[in-house]
Amino acid sequence: MPYCQHGELECIINRVEDCARTQVQSNWAAVDFLVCMEEQYDSLAANAQDFTKIDAAITQCAGSLDAAAIQGCYNSQQGFQQQQVSAKNTPAHDGVPYLLVNGQSLQTPSFGSKDDPILSCPDFLSRALCSVLSDPPASCTSEYLM
């Protein structure tokens, strides 16, 4: 079983999200579902073992995805297998957030260490992305990001 830094609910939600990704051709197609489930996290935290609330969140977030299939998957052998696949595909890293841009960790010396105050800036991701784009949009040159 993969290690989940924030406990059992994180493992459950990870399995839910892994099961949702099995229904789509790319992770991008599941983004709305993933964001919605993450937004439900705090309300689910008080009742991590209340699977009816998790199922309700899945139904609420499913959109065009098959909620019943996700519900049938996440607490089954298939869900645990999908979680194992995701864990094996995750590169070793010191902590979260762990972000890659063009295969390079945003916590490498070219972007600053994990203790660098820039990582706590709300626009850190925008700055990091702008720094590696070959043809950055005009918003990358805004005074706010410079």
Image (cartoon, helix red, strand yellow):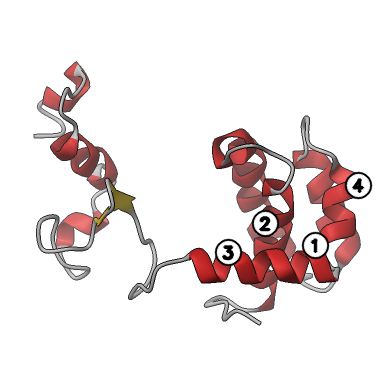
Precedes in sequence: disc 1 or disc 3 = 1
Q: Amino acid at mark 4?
A: Ala
Dot 1 crowding, Cα within 10 Å, few <14, some 14–19, many 20+: many
Label of residue 86 in the image: 3
The residue positioned 64% from the left and 37% from the top of the image is 25
Q: Residue at x 17, y 55 (%)?
A: 118
Disc 2 element: helix
Q: Nearer the viewer, mark 1 or mark 3?
A: 3
Residue 17 location, quadrant: bottom right
| Residue 68, placed above or below residue 91 | above
Report the residue marked by disc 4: 68
Give the Cα distance between marks 1 and 2: 8 Å
Report which residue position mark 2 lands on: 18
Given the image, on which type of amino acid does mark 1 rest? Answer: Tyr
The residue that mark 1 highlights is 74
- In the rendered image, is residue 130 in sight? yes
Image-quadrant location for residue 131:
top left
Quarter of the image that includes the N terminus: bottom right
* Inter-mark Cα distance, 3 to 2: 7 Å
Q: Can you give x and y, in whole percent of width and height, for residue 36 in the image?
A: 65, 43
46 to the left or right of 110: right
Q: Pointers 3 and 4 in contact (CB under 8 A)?
A: no
Looking at the image, residue 37 lies above or below residue 133: below
